[in-house]
Image (cartoon, rainbow, N blue to C red):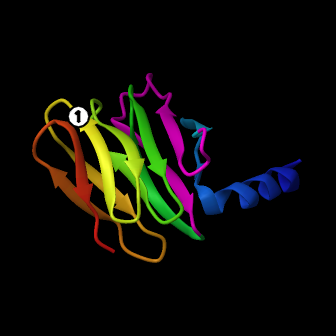
């Protein structure tokens, strides 16, 4: 059974998948056009009082550590070349292209950007609304 699970993970990991833990579960939603996938992570450890729990984003052959906060759904939206994690609960990724992200938020946000083969970086979006954010390789 474990070998079958590893095969399933290996097939999904290039597009984005999560290695959770006893406290972090997730679901994956593939967008209608197939270009994007959103992973929704949930830290279900409400009893210990710990503010977060570890998990790992598997994407494009790389493994990125994640710190999943308790008590909130953590979305990560992925395209073939980039994964984006808004760090505020009111922010949504609406689209990812080769050069821009389209995001929506009430009051701005910070975005974590995951590029396979590169270090994770953060981009500050100072204001809210629907807007395009230029991403450089």
Q: Which residue is drawn at 57% across and 37% down?
A: 26
Residue 92 position by quadrant:
top left
Residue 132 placement, left or right of 37: left
| Residue sitting farthest toward the front | 33
Residue 65 placement (x, y as % from top left):
45, 59
Q: From the viewer's side, name the closer residue of 80 and 84.
A: 80
- Could you tell me if residue 87 is visible in this image? no
Q: In the rendered image, which quarter contains the C terminus? A: bottom left
Q: What element carries label 1?
A: strand
The residue pinned by badge 1 equals 105
Q: Nearer the viewer, residue 50 or 86?
A: 86
Side (left or right) of 109 relative to 33? left
Q: In the rendered image of this protein, does residue 111 appear above or below residue 32?
A: below
Query: Per the image, is 103 magenta?
Result: no
Q: Position of residue 125 (x, y in %)?
A: 16, 49
Query: Could you tell me which residue is drawn at 28 percent across and 64 percent down?
Result: 135
The span picked out in magenta is: 32-60
Above or below 32: residue 66: below
Considering every residue shown, the one lying at the far top of the view is: 47
The residue at the point 61 percent across, 58 percent down is: 15
**Membership of 59 in magenta stretch:** yes
């Amino acid at each position: 059974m474990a070998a079958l699970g590893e095969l399933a993970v290996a097939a999904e990991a290039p597009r984005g998948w999560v290695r959770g833990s006893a406290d972090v579960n997730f679901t994956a939603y593939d967008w209608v056009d197939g270009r994007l996938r959103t992973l929704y992570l949930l830290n279900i450890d409400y009893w210990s009082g710990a503010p977060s729990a570890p998990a790992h984003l598997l994407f494009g052959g790389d493994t990125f550590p994640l710190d999943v906060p308790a008590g909130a759904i953590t979305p990560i939206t992925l395209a073939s070349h980039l994964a984006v994690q808004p760090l505020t609960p009111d922010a949504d990724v609406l689209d990812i292209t080769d050069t821009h992200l389209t995001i929506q938020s009430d009051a701005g946000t910070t975005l974590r950007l995951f590029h396979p083969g590169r270090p994770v970086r953060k981009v500050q979006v100072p204001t809210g609304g629907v807007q395009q954010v230029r991403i450089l390789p």
